[in-house]
Image (spheres, grey):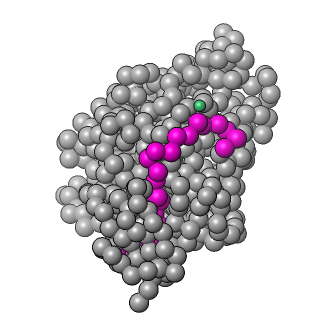
């Protein structure tokens, strides 16, 4: 019979191939892919357009209260609207536990807020700040079974940092129950030691953030996180990779057979440390952790994406306004140590990579799809439902016009941050129509769906955690989770 939606004559790209075909959608699912499909009640001619899987952004901070008590400017409405306008149809964002919080309360709070506001589908990672016995033995197994199949842990920040013993505890539980552990890898004491000396000498400007967060702090902690994951033989995913040496360390571990995965972000391809060296506090607009490096580190990140060392390209959208509510809690007197860390990028993530990667011939369209959608689905338990245009998958896709030229300004974006670090860039290509479960979300530069129409996606076991042949070493640890994971030393 007829379809709810037929997309005709598009050039479809998945991570493995590109082909010309029509797509027929029924009840939000792709029901057919082929030539000359019957009409749809909504019938769209995509001739001349690229039809790509909707982007999956697996690293976004939405409506999140930071450890320092700063609220993100984007809620689940503005954050998901901005994502959709940039061609993204699924986000994973963080439920942030603060050390005193009960995990079930944290999750219930985020779930309620997202349900009322999101316009595209979403899932959550848990930021785990307090891996005590209650968390390890009771809460984590339950939330993983409830579809939150990933955790983020921090090796730095006073209020979030876990020590190596605690990281091992978390890895052991994640391995046992099948969750991906995302690690913010920076050496806390190296940053603290340098920062203190800079501040004592009156070096408070944003550019000193990049001095305090030396690339060695990232590479040391990355090596340590990987080493801990190898000890217990549990996969790990290093997020927001910035530095050349860090990319090399990850590549080396992968060559040794370690199940190490990694993410990088637009800021590490398109921004540089020197962007933070601006008059006054302007440089704060370019400050994130870890900070972008130089041209050589940008090239290392491109090479890492190209050779598969880096698996996922996410925004790390951290929507802090350039004012006292966000980046500058003490106004003009804010030191680099007091700024909220992070840059926005949820809407421009895909257009930046499409323009500078695909259109300039640095990556293929299939690599673009893998890095922006398919690999996220595999790493985080969204496959086969999301991340690929295939019969049986959710009808999540974006129609891209590669001839569309866009001059980037903060005013054209849909987030509530008020600035973009990519102001003034000229981009080639834009997602002109976006579909989520067969619903047209964006057309003619207008939102077509209602607040709250996005759905929570309970995720399955991430692919790296499936069908693992436990090594002898891992055998020693498995089954001992409840026993070995008592309260950890301070
Ligand atoms: N870590 C993130 O993941 N995002 C923003 C800042 C940070 O430190
Ligand atoms: Zn982080
Ligand atoms: Zn982040
Ligand atoms: Zn222009």
Q: In the current view of this chain or complex, which residue is farthest to the top?
A: 201
| Total count of labels | 0
- Left or right, 103 with respect to 164, comes to right
In the image, residue 87 sits, relative to residue 249, either above or below, namely below
* Residue 76 on image: x %, y %: 66, 59
Quarter of the image that includes the C terminus: top right
- Report whether residue 413 is seen: yes
Whether residue 394 is in magenta: the answer is: yes
- Left or right, 157 with respect to 340, comes to left
**Quarter of the view holding residue 356:** top left
Quarter of the image that includes the N terminus: bottom left
Residue at the spot 36% in from the left edge and 70% down from the top edge: 22
In the image, residue 408 sits, relative to residue 430, either above or below, namely above
Q: Please tell me which residue lies in front, 449 or 468.
A: 449
Residue at the spot 65% in from the left edge and 61% down from the top edge: 447
- Report whether residue 63 is seen: no
Residue at the spot 65% in from the left edge and 30% down from the top edge: 285
* Residue 91 on image: x %, y %: 53, 58
Q: Range of the magenta residues?
A: 391-412
**Quarter of the view holding residue 241:** top left
Q: Please tell me which residue lies in front, 269 or 260.
A: 269
* Residue 469 on image: x %, y %: 20, 63
């Amino acid at each position: 019979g007829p379809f709810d939606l037929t997309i005709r004559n598009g050039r479809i790209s998945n991570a493995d191939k590109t082909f010309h075909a029509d797509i027929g959608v029924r009840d939000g699912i792709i029901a057919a892919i082929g030539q000359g499909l019957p009409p749809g009640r909504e019938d769209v001619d995509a001739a001349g357009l690229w039809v790509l899987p909707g982007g999956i952004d697996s690293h976004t901070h939405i409506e999140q209260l930071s450890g320092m008590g700063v609220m993100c400017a984007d809620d689940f409405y503005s954050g998901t609207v901005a994502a959709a306008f940039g061609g993204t149809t699924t986000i994973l964002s963080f439920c942030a536990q603060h050390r005193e919080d009960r995990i079930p309360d944290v999750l219930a709070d985020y779930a309620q807020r997202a349900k009322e506001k999101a316009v595209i589908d979403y899932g959550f990672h848990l930021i785990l700040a307090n891996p005590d016995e209650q968390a390890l033995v009771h809460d984590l197994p339950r939330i993983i079974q409830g579809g939150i199949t990933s955790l983020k842990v921090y090796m730095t920040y006073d209020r979030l940092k876990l020590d190596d013993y605690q990281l091992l505890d978390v890895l052991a539980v994640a391995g046992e129950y099948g969750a991906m552990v995302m690690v913010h890898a920076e050496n806390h004491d190296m940053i603290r030691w340098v920062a203190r000396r800079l501040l004592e000498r009156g070096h408070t400007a944003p550019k000193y953030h990049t001095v305090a967060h030396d690339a060695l702090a990232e590479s040391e902690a990355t090596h340590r996180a990987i080493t801990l994951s190898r000890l217990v033989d549990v996969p790990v995913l290093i997020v927001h990779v910035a530095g050349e040496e860090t990319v090399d360390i990850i590549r080396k571990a992968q060559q040794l057979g370690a199940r190490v995965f990694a993410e990088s972000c637009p800021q590490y391809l398109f921004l540089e440390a020197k962007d933070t060296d601006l008059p006054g506090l302007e440089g704060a607009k370019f400050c994130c952790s870890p900070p972008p490096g130089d041209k050589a580190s940008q090239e290392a990140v491109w090479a890492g994406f190209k050779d598969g060392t880096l698996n996922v390209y996410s925004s790390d959208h951290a929507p802090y306004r350039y004012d006292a509510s966000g980046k500058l809690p003490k106004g003009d007197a804010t030191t680099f140590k007091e700024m909220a860390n992070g840059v926005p990028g949820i809407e421009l993530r895909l257009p930046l990579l499409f323009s500078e990667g695909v259109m300039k011939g640095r990556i293929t369209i299939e690599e673009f799809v893998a890095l922006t959608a398919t690999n996220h689905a595999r790493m985080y338990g969204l496959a086969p439902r999301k991340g690929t245009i295939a019969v049986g998958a959710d009808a999540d896709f974006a129609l891209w016009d590669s001839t569309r030229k866009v001059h980037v300004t903060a005013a054209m974006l849909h987030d509530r941050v008020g600035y973009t670090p990519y102001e003034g860039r000229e981009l080639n290509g834009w997602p002109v129509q976006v579909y989520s479960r067969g619903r047209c979300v964006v057309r003619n530069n207008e939102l077509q769906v209602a607040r709250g129409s996005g759905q929570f996606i309970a995720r399955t076991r991430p692919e790296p955690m499936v069908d693992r042949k436990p090594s002898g070493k891992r055998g020693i640890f498995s089954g001992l989770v409840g026993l070995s994971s008592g309260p950890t030393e301070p």
